[in-house]
Image (cartoon, helix red, strand yellow):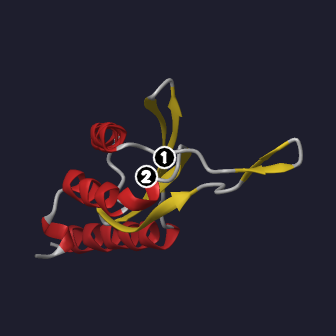
């Protein structure tokens, strides 16, 4: 099966499942997915694995439970409904555990390419010139 045959929601489900082990040891961080042609390519987690307080290193807290990971996955899939017409970009899910519930904040970043825009403009211009000659 090819990646372009999978819906973006199914791809997001696969990403969260792949990150499950890492999420189980983190109580906060940022999950990022990079999208190209409406397909997820690179993905991962940005986080600070070591915290210190008053000059002493702290043991990492328990990460997301399986219930919290399911909640995270559902919210990430639901957030895809807010992605508009862009096909290239990045989505970042900042997450933290508060009062035993996972809380996420979503940031969408669309990417465009000037070279592609110029090619499309040139194609439209050439098409118009050809149609005027008819």
Q: Which residue, as the protein is rendered here, is positioned at the far right? A: 55
Q: Which residue, as the protein is rendered here, is positioned at the far top? A: 99
Relative to 40, is 57 above or below?
above
Instruction: Please give the residue where the numbered disc 2 appears in the rendered image.
Output: 24
Crowd rating for badge 1 (residues with CA inside 10 Å; few <14, some 14–19, many 20+)? some
Using the rendered image of the protein, determine whether residue 90 is visible from the camera's viewpoint. Answer: no
Relative to 60, is 88 above or below?
below
Tell me the tag on residue 82. Answer: none
Instruction: Please give the residue where the numbered disc 1 appears in the rendered image.
Output: 63
Q: Is residue 56 left or right of residue 8?
A: right
Q: Quadrant of the N terminus?
A: bottom left
SS of the residue at dot 2?
loop
The structure residue drawn at horizontal position 61% and vertical position 55%, both measured from the top left corner, is 47
The structure residue drawn at horizontal position 43% and vertical position 44%, both measured from the top left corner, is 64
Q: Is residue 55 left or right of residue 19?
A: right
Residue 49, x across and y down, in percent: 64, 57
Residue in the foreground of this view, choosing between 26 and 56: 56
Q: Quadrant of the C terminus?
A: bottom left
SS of the residue at dot 1?
loop
Q: Which callout, 2 or 1, points at the residue further toward the start of the chain?
A: 2
Residue 97, x across and y down, in percent: 51, 34
Relative to 8, is 122 above or below?
below
The structure residue drawn at horizontal position 40% and vertical position 74%, both measured from the top left corner, is 119
Q: Are marks 2 and 1 in contact (CB under 8 Å)?
A: yes
Crowd rating for badge 2 (residues with CA inside 10 Å; few <14, some 14–19, many 20+)? some
Location of residue 130 (image quadrant): bottom left
| Residues at marks 2 and 1, CA–CA distance in whole angstroms | 4 Å
- State how many labels appear: 2
Using the rendered image of the protein, determine whether residue 92 is visible from the camera's viewpoint. Answer: yes
């Amino acid at each position: 099966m090819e990646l372009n045959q999978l819906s973006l929601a199914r791809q997001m489900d696969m990403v969260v499942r792949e990150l499950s082990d890492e999420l189980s040891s983190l109580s906060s961080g940022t999950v990022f997915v990079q999208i190209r042609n409406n397909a997820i390519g690179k993905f991962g987690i940005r986080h600070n694995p070591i915290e210190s307080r008053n000059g002493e290193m702290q043991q990492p807290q328990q990460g997301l439970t399986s219930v919290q990971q399911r909640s995270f996955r559902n919210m990430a899939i639901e957030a895809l409904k807010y992605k508009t017409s862009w096909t290239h970009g990045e989505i970042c899910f900042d997450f933290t555990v508060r009062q035993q519930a996972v809380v996420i904040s979503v940031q969408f970043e669309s990417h465009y390419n000037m070279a592609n825009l110029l090619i499309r403009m040139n194609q439209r211009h050439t098409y118009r010139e050809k149609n005027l000659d008819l």
